[in-house]
């Protein structure tokens, strides 16, 4: 039979949600697997498109390594999925202390995510 090459699933660097619109993350070390992020996660975290020299000038999202480290040190977790990987946004409701992944908030139906407004 014909062998198909294995392609690892695309996983967002900042949340656990599978599927959606992804863009590649800047990574000058292309020897390891390519990294991806949801377009929505990039926008809500204020990340920028940059040109990657390693990918012949292709536009990618700037590195998320520092952002991931910052949230890992904060010991926060997503109040929806309970996950501790990626980045979180604080709830916009006055007095609410919850934090969540943007994609978890959008998919849960528990939160109002206002487009054009960087708060939930």
Image: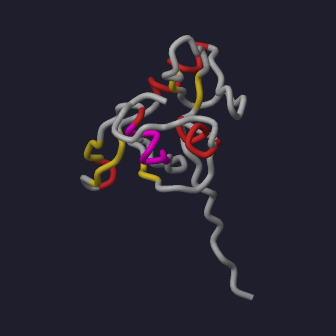
Horizontal placement of 92 versus 97: left or right?
Answer: left
| Magenta span dominant secondary structure | helix
Camera-side residue of 79 and 10? 79
Residue 99, compared with residue 18, is above or below; it is above
Q: How many marks?
A: 0
Q: Nearer the viewer, residue 52 or 24?
A: 24
Which residue is depicted at the point 69% across and 30% down?
A: 83
Q: Which residue occupies 61% across, 46% down?
A: 107
Q: Is residue 38 magenta?
A: yes
Whole-percent x, y for residue 90 in the image: 52, 21
- Residue 13 figure quarter: top right
* Residue 80 appears left or right of 27: right
Where is residue 76 drawn, in percent x and y? 62, 17
In the rendering, at what x and y percent does residue 61 appear? 36, 42
Magenta-span inclusion, residue 115: no
User: Compared to 44, does 54 lie above or below?
Assistant: below
- The quarter of the picture where residue 25 lies is top left
Q: Residue at coordinates 27% horizontally, 42% vertically from top-left? A: 50
Question: Looking at the image, which residue is at 34% across and 39% down?
Answer: 116
**Whole-percent x and y of residue 17?**
62, 46
Question: How is the protein colored in the picture?
Answer: secondary structure
Q: As displayed, is residue 79 above or below residue 115?
A: above
Say if residue 97 shows up in the picture.
yes
Q: Looking at the picture, tell me which residue is in the foreground, 93 or 81.
A: 93
Vertical placement of residue 115 versus 10, above or below: above
The answer to which quarter of the image holds residue 27 is top left
Q: Residue furthest right?
A: 1
Is 91 or 2 nearer to us in this picture? 91
Please identify the quadrant where the N terminus is shown: bottom right
**Residue segment shown in magenta:** 36-43
């Amino acid at each position: 039979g014909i062998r198909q090459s294995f392609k690892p699933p695309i996983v967002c660097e900042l949340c656990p949600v599978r599927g959606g619109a992804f863009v590649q993350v800047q990574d000058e070390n292309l020897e390891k697997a390519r990294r991806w992020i949801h377009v929505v996660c990039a926008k809500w975290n204020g990340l920028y498109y940059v040109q990657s020299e390693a990918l012949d000038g292709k536009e990618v999202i700037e590195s998320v390594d520092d952002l991931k480290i910052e949230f890992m040190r904060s010991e926060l977790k997503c109040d929806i999925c309970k996950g501790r990987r990626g980045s979180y946004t604080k709830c916009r409701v006055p007095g609410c202390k919850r934090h969540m992944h943007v994609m978890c908030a959008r998919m849960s139906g528990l939160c109002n995510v206002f487009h054009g407004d960087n708060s939930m």
